[in-house]
Image (cartoon, rainbow, N blue to C red):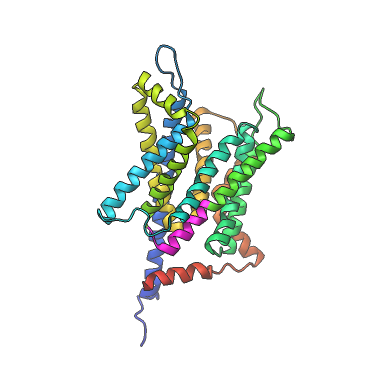
Amino acid sequence: RPRTVIKDGSSPGNMAVASAEVASTLKLAVLSVGIWVSFVAFGYAQEHLTSHEFGEKKERFTHTSALVLLQSIGNAIVAYAALLLTKGSKVSITGGVPVKDWLIVAMGYLGAHKFGLEALRYIIFPLQVVVKSCKSIPVMLGEVVLAGEKHSASKRMSVFLLTLGVLVFTLRAPKKKGSEEFHLDAKTLWGLFLVFLALCCDGIYGPYQNKIEHAYHVSEFHLMLNMNLWQGLFATMLILPSGELTECIAFAYRHPGVLKEFAIFAATMAVGNVFIFKLQHDFGALTVTKITTIRKLASVLFSVVVFGHHMNPSQWIGVFIVFFSNQLSKMTCSVLGIKDAPPKAKADRAEAKKTK
């Protein structure tokens, strides 16, 4: 039976595929912008909360571990509310996923945060940023090992170029007067080891979310709820022995105005998480990592424009590589004659979902 062909020569099937690709690209753009906007607002709220001076004694809020617990609670509440709205009151909190799987992914989630923060006690912040900018690589490896992903050549090249661009941008930044110098001593090596552990955790929790989603077909709100619920539990176990939670409550009692700051902090973080977990659910951990990496660089560029900071030519090259990494990767594969066929594993999963 001959296919129906439109006047321009394209078939309805091809038009449907093209339409789906446009819709997917539009969704990716909306989610990306949502992440960038919400986390710029979150960054402002976080900085204002931790730098604002409260009361006559001009006290500052320094209980950062309590903030991890606060954001976990806020994210979990929003995720549970979304589940009730979309799935009804009889929704399963775990989504049918064994608790041990949620524990694994939540421990990786918490470890990525804690090891990264702990490393700052031993190494300077710019060095931590440089190493963490390579996050896309362990996440991509984690997707291969844990979730069985098979990435196309252009995607692997894109990750390499994205990492290269951020490294060029960071390493070529002009040094400030009085800034700390880099010395490879025992203290620095320990700090780098902690960052390495943080990267290992990054390579576990994102791809493991992919594995859970593919195996149990849970929603993005199941991911968001359980990640933050279990991370909050672990954070509570860490801060209770230290007495930090008691100190945080006492601070709020002395300065009731901080409660408003807490609400803004938790709300902006929760909104950002809705976008992130939707992106994670629909596009995978590697896409989330790339978008958030670009978001960090975009924040720096925003600072350059607003506050008039200087950038040298090498840094602009790094910016160009980052923002055009996808196009450059496809051009490179084409020039080198590298085949860029769609990953079979991902195509098989997509087909399996359609038949369910």
Quadrant where the C terminus is found in the figure: bottom left
Q: Is residue 288 left or right of residue 260?
A: right
- Asked whether 214 falls inside the magenta stretch, the response is yes
Q: Main secondary structure of the magenta part?
A: helix
Furthest toward the bottom, the residue is 1
Please give the range of residues in magenta: 205-218
- Could you tell me if residue 192 is visible in this image? yes
**Quadrant location of the N terminus?**
bottom left
Place of residue 73 in the rendered image (x, y in percent of width and height, measured from the top left): 38, 39
Quarter location, residue 319: top right
> What residue occupies the far front of the structure in this picture?
241
Image coords of residue 307 (percent x, y) = 51, 28
Q: Is residue 20 magenta?
A: no
Q: Position of residue 103 (x, y in %)?
A: 47, 51
Residue 40 is at least partly visible in this image: no
Query: In this view of the protein, which residue sits in the foreground, 294 or 232?
Result: 232
Q: Against 144, is 11 above or below?
A: below
Q: Which one is nearer the viewer's eye here, 99 or 15?
A: 99
Identity of the residue drawn at 40% across and 43% down: 272
Total numbered labels placed on residues in the image: 0
Q: Is 266 located above or below residue 256 in the figure?
A: below
Q: Nearer the viewer, residue 343 or 123?
A: 123
Say which quarter of the image contains residue 281: bottom left
Q: Residue at x 37, y 69 (%)?
A: 16
Q: Is residue 249 left or right of residue 158?
A: left
- Front-most of residues 97 and 274: 97
Depicted 26 relative to depicted 248: above or below = below
Query: Quick check: 245 left or right of 85?
Result: right
Residue depicted at 35% across the width and 74% down the height: 12
Can you give x and y, in whole percent of width and height, for residue 46 in the image?
Answer: 44, 31
